[in-house]
Amino acid sequence: MIEEISANLYRIEVPLPKNPLKAINSYVIKNTERNLVIDTGWNQEVCMQVMQAGLKELGVDMEKTDFFITHLHADHFGLVSNLITDDSKIYFNQPDVDRFKSGFRLEAFLNFARLNGFPESELQKALRSHPGLKFRPSADLAFHILKESDMIRIGDYAFKCIETPGHTWGHMCLYEPGKKIFVSGDHILNDITPNIQLWSDEWNPLKEYLASLDKVYELDINLVLPGHRGIFRDCRKRIQELKQHHQDRLDEIVAILGKAKMNAFRVASKMTWDIVSDSWDVFPVSQKWFATGEAIAHLKYLKEKGIIRSEIRKQKIVFSLNRNHSI
Ligand SMILES: [Zn+2]
């Protein structure tokens, strides 16, 4: 489960049972003064056991260990409350901290999901099984806030903070320019596509995500350390693939809408998904939730571009192609 990636930099693979992501990569940088752990796993017993065993095997003194969290999602952030000691710093970004502090806004989620056609019968179940609710940190936490270009220095490593909003409001990556190493969190993954979803009308995550991909494209990177699955080298090639993936998604949604008016849940049910399942009806409800959130993010992007429009019909938001806009 432990792999040495370069001198004093290790990966611990932390399992995420019964989740399509399978596992999360926690990166550990060892140094005599302070150690750094990047991302942690869910706040769940099996994650705790693997992390504790891994850190022990690496001989990491937890009394001298700080944490960097790439983003708010519970698989990266959830376990940190159980791993910190009195002197630990938790490095985190302000936008995600703001969301964490405002709590899991269940009512707002429910209302927005209803407006977007998520069936009432499945709604409660979807939210009860939501990892953000089940596996979040168990304590009130104090954070050390980092911004664009701030540096974290540990031994031979000097990491520069790169703000990459899109996957979450404040997602942050780390770049080591001397070693050309890029810790990508869930901004860039190689074997799967990062989930870009939207559950409020407050922002346009896909627009920000695509801009964040362009930003990272400019960096000279030799090795990408992602939040899930395999480590890889060709970052620019992967960025091009991810941009193409989202363009294909946008094209697919425009084709699905055709001459129809449809809510986001229906649009999601007609999109193609990687999940092995006979039909949308038998999709696990938690995956319907992520799929609908992804559809909403793409619909929002198309709407802001003026390609589609929305209106309220029977207390639901329905989308249709904007006839005045030629594609
Ligand atoms: Zn995530």
Image: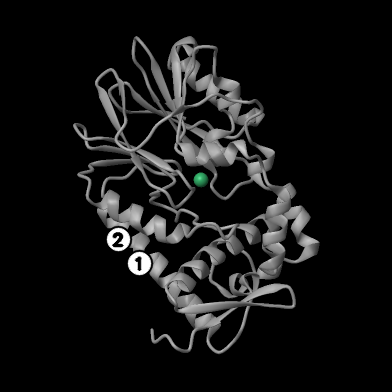
Q: Secondary structure at mark 2?
A: helix
Q: Is residue 279 visible?
A: no
State whether residue 256 is above or below residue 179: below
* Three-letter code, disc 1: Gln
Circles 1 and 2 in contact, beta carbons < 8 Å: yes
The residue that appears at 54% across and 19% down in the rendered structure is 84
The x and y percentages for residue 133 are: 68, 42
**Relative image position of residue 242 (x, y in whole percent):** 37, 60
Residue 76: percent from the left, percent from the top?
52, 36
In this figure, which residue is indicated by the disc labeled 2? Answer: 240
Residue in view at x 49 percent, y 41 percent: 95
> Of the numbered discs in the image, which one, if any, rests on residue 244?
1
Screen quadrant of the C terminus:
bottom left
Q: CA distance from mark 1 to mark 2?
A: 6 Å
Q: Which label was assigned to residue 78?
A: none
Query: Label 1's element?
Result: helix
Q: Quadrant of residue 193?
A: bottom left
Q: Amino acid at mark 2?
A: Gln
Residue 79 visible? The answer is yes
